[in-house]
Amino acid sequence: MNVSISLTINGKAVEASIDPRTLLVQFIREHMQLTGTHVGCDTAQCGACTVHIDGQAVKSCSILACQAQGTEVTTIEGLARNGVLHPMQEAFRECHGLQCGYCTPGMVMSAIHLLAEHPQANEDQIREGLDGNLCRCTGYQNIVKSIQRVQQQLDTLR
């Protein structure tokens, strides 16, 4: 028996009838065709599926889609505005904070949330804040540099 859900994804109101066992990551990828949110481990260990739900970073493989009922979900696709990358996306590009790119959407989403919560985080705090997002390619140095680049931009705006 299906359940009806309604939520907002990337600013667009969505209603659907889904199997109640559908994970949010499956709903985003399979029903909404937003494939930037990646499935890496299916156990909430790698962070590749991180999205924002009502402004909080959440691993979308760890919750059912019906648990997102009535929420505002932002995926990596929802960050750019009018064809302009979000500053964090741009920083990852400029600072080479990616290699294969598989972890990048989750890293970017986690990094945005990290700076929203801790805009003055030092390098150790940034590394700790990324705990739970795994990258097998970069060694994290350029990911940290990317986040620090956005911090510098925020400092100039203050």
Image: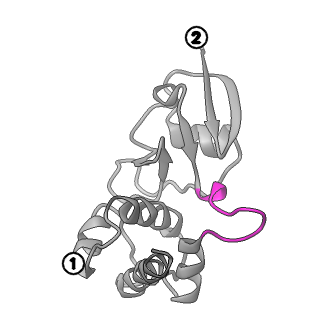
Per the image, the residue denoted by label 2 is 1
Q: Quadrant of the N terminus?
A: top right
Identify the mark at residue 57; answer none if there is no mark: none
Per the image, the residue denoted by label 1 is 124
Three-letter amino acid code at the position of disc 1 = Asp
Specify whether residue 149 is painted magenta.
no
Q: Is residue 115 above or below residue 23?
A: below
Viewer-nearest residue: 107 or 8:
8
Three-letter amino acid code at the position of disc 2 = Met
x, y (%) of residue 120?
30, 73
Q: Which residue is drawn at 51% across and 89% down?
A: 95
Q: Which residue is drawn at 46% across and 47% down?
A: 55
Q: Provide the secondary structure element on which disc 2 rests.
A: loop
In the image: residue 72, left or right of residue 123:
right
Task: Say which label, 1 or 2, has the lower sequence index.
Answer: 2
Residue 137 seen from this side: no
The magenta segment: 76-86
x, y (%) of residue 43?
35, 48
x, y (%) of residue 157?
50, 76
Q: Provide the secondary structure element on which disc 1 rests.
A: helix
Residue 110 seen from this side: yes
x, y (%) of residue 155?
42, 79
Q: Residue furthest top?
A: 1
Q: In which quarter of the image is the C terminus?
A: bottom left
CA distance for labels 1 and 2: 48 Å
Q: Which residue is drawn at 40% across and 60% down?
A: 116
